[in-house]
Amino acid sequence: MGLLLVLRPPQPRPQSLRRATRAQRREHNRADAEEWATAEERGLLLDVSVERLLPLMNAAGGSRLPILGQLDPWSDGVLRRKDLPQLNAEVDRLETVAGDNVERGLVAALRALLVRWRDEPGLSLHWYGD
């Protein structure tokens, strides 16, 4: 199970694909795949294993992490720029409880994504669950 974190411009409300033809669905999925590949190349995408993130979050306080606590692996959402200072503080808490190299690597990747977000002011942090 994964959680995809992507820095991208604010998006309009997505249109439902409920009545889309197969060709329209294929085109939509192809466009998403291209966008994700470009974002990954630019360092704007992080694919997080929930099995790695949840124990780390629980050790850092779990429900007492107001921003990270919103990340639901079964839904999608958006964090705004005003959330960045609190999110930085929560990543600091994750860093203090990271116990092995895998957890420290995850925290370093989260921190790198937040630095990119700070440096590119027109972006929001979107998350996409499975």
Image (cartoon, helix red, strand yellow):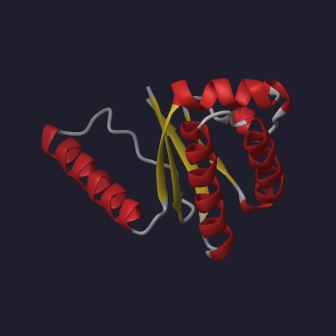
Residue at the (20%, 46%) spot, across then down = 24
Q: Is residue 17 visible?
A: yes
Q: Is residue 108 above or below residue 62?
A: below
What percent of the width, then of the height, locates residue 63?
81, 25
What percent of the width, then of the height, locates residue 56?
68, 30
Q: Is residue 102 above or below residue 45?
A: above
Quarter of image, res 47: top left
**Quadrant showing the N terminus:** top left
Q: Is residue 86 left or right of residue 31?
A: right
**Quadrant showing the C terminus:** top left
Which sits in the foreground, 48 or 73?
Answer: 48
What percent of the width, then of the height, locates residue 120?
61, 75
What percent of the width, then of the height, locates residue 59?
76, 26
Residue at the (54%, 66%) spot, across then down = 9
Which sits in the foreground, 118 or 34?
Answer: 118
Q: Is residue 108 above or below residue 122?
A: above
Residue at the (22%, 52%) spot, across then down = 30
Direction left: furthest residue = 23
Q: Is residue 12 visible?
A: no
Residue at the (77%, 54%) spot, across then down = 88
Total labels: the figure holds 0
Q: Is residue 82 above or below residue 4?
A: below
